[in-house]
Amino acid sequence: METIFYKLIYDKQLKRSLNILEILYKAKHAVTMKELQEKLNISLKSVLPSLEFTKTLLPDNIELTVSEKIVSLHQHDTSQPIDSALIEIAKSTIPYQILKHIFYDGDILIAELAEMLFVSESSLRIYIKHMNRTMTFFGLSISFRDVKLLGDETNIRYFFYAYFSEFQELFVSVCADELEYFSGLYKNMRKMQLEYDDKLIHYSYQQISRWLFIVRDRLELGKFVSVKKSLAKRIQSHPSFKNFKDIYESEITKTLTSPNIPISEVIWAYVVSFNSIIYTNDKNHLLYHDKLDSKSCQNKLAAVLKNVINTLGVNDEDYEDFFAIHMAYLLNLSLLTEISPIFQLGSDSIKNYVAGNLEYLYTTWLGALNRLQHDKIFTITNSHSIASQLAMISSQFIYRQKTQVKKILFSFEGESGFAVYLETLAKTLVPEGVEALFVYNEPINSKTIEKTKPDIFVCNYQVNEKFDNCKMLRLSYVPLTQEWKLLKELIINPNWHSFL
């Protein structure tokens, strides 16, 4: 799926060229024309003119070459590194320039912006109209006369957070200077927090710094959020809110021209900080949420969590930690949802990755979230993204715990080197505590199964006999990536895909 950055670009040729540069940079090596065709999903006839246009975007010290159907980037000198050049090219796109002016200047007349960007007003309106199709997803739009973002302030901030985060993922970093600046603010906040508590909340430095960066610039423009009175009252009763308020107000106002900010901004920042928490099983950090809040919500969530724990077969020694961490995530998410359901979105790239790589955990949580929706514990608008987050949090317990599978029997056919290679790959998938047995010098039949007693039998050739006492996974002769993933899922839960 396309990222926000690419969706906002109107010029298809420019979009394709930026995609080519991203592919070449991330590959760190030469790429074949066939690979480019597949990744771009276009014909060879379309690749060639796209490569020619891409060359025109590059500075003099960086060259794109095509030789014998091999495409590569070359840097002739170090005056400008490749990653820096890509950032500058990405920043020069019209959508980025429009959003930069909106972010730093608040709003600007379309005639002024058109003159600054060296485009006509009519062209600029076409760009904005195209961008608004993507902005609708965030409940936002860009106005045409005085170019500014229209919509709820929380959604505006979330959009900029998502856009800048994605930009960093694609092109190294969009705001490295600002993040460096905020490292001092972040350190002071942590130092002051330790004066109140003996443990720190486990924040992601990159995430919370980016939020602080966005909030500071919105506050400078006088763009404030509003918070529901009922939520504000509850948050101000949290034992940890006063500590946060003292720290946050003291530090954030140092960065502002006008230091007076409404209490709604402090409440908003307190809740949104939960969006930057790392949910690891770390005894040195706080348990992320106020236990006094939402007793009825906690009781309902507890029933759902116990069901998930039983389904996943969580070890007894991990029960309490698994329960506490997932409870914390869901309670924090319920508070974030009260600020805006937009915090449930997550990124498509992460969601798709988890759906493909942590399938059993992902589908288990999807089922649990359906129950949460039915019980109306809190409003769920994006169950797929939430399920992907929960699957990743659960993986720290599930993928290291003792599996129900004790022994796997492998039998591969093929050239000597190929069979050895498949055995090597298979060994990397077998977790500690599971015995991997490889049999080549005898046929696999009921006697072999009875003698070795495996929980799972894996092969890459046809075995006509069916075995009652173990699962059998027939791989392709040259196993597909998806088939190795399926094996990983079977190791975690032998009942997964029971049709095998």
Image (spheres, rainbow, N blue to C red):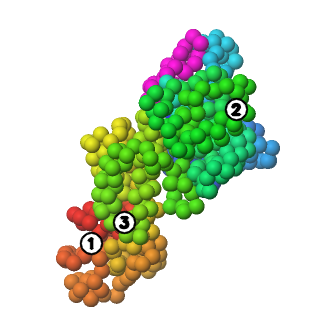
In the shown orientation, is residue 145 left or right of residue 451? Answer: right
Residue 319 x, y percent position in the rendering: 39, 64
Per the rendered image, the range of residues in magenta is 123-151
Residue 391 x, y percent position in the rendering: 41, 55
Indicate which disc, 1 or 3, sits on the residue closer to the N terminus: 3
Residue 358, above or below 428: above
Residue 443 x, y percent position in the rendering: 27, 84
Task: Check the picture and name the quadrant holding the N terminus.
Answer: top left
Residue 283 lies in quadrant: bottom right
Q: CA distance from mark 3 to mark 2?
A: 46 Å
Which residue carries the number 2 mark?
Answer: 253
| Tag 2 secondary structure | helix
Q: Is residue 282 among the parts visible in the rendering?
A: yes
Residue at 51% over, 54% down: 287
User: Of the residues shown, which amino acid type is indicated by label 3?
Assistant: Val
Residue 58, above or below 281: above
Q: Magenta segment: does it hold 128?
A: yes
Tell me if mark 3 has few (under 14), some (14-19) or many (20+) residues whose alpha carbon lies within 10 angstroms of its own. Answer: many
Q: Nearer the viewer, mark 3 or mark 2?
A: 2
Residue at 57% over, 57% down: 285
Residue at 51% over, 58% down: 280
Which residue carries the number 3 mark?
Answer: 314
Q: CA distance from mark 1 to mark 3?
A: 24 Å
Tell me if mark 2 has few (under 14), some (14-19) or many (20+) residues whose alpha carbon lies within 10 angstroms of its own. Answer: some
Q: Nearer the viewer, mark 2 or mark 1?
A: 2
Indicate which disc, 3 or 2, sits on the residue closer to the N terminus: 2
Q: Magenta segment: does it hold 420?
A: no
Question: Is the C-beta separation of discs 1 and 3 under 8 Å?
Answer: no
User: Of the residues shown, which amino acid type is indicated by label 2?
Assistant: Thr
| Tag 3 secondary structure | loop
Which residue carries the number 1 mark?
Answer: 472
User: Of the residues shown, which amino acid type is indicated by label 1?
Assistant: Met
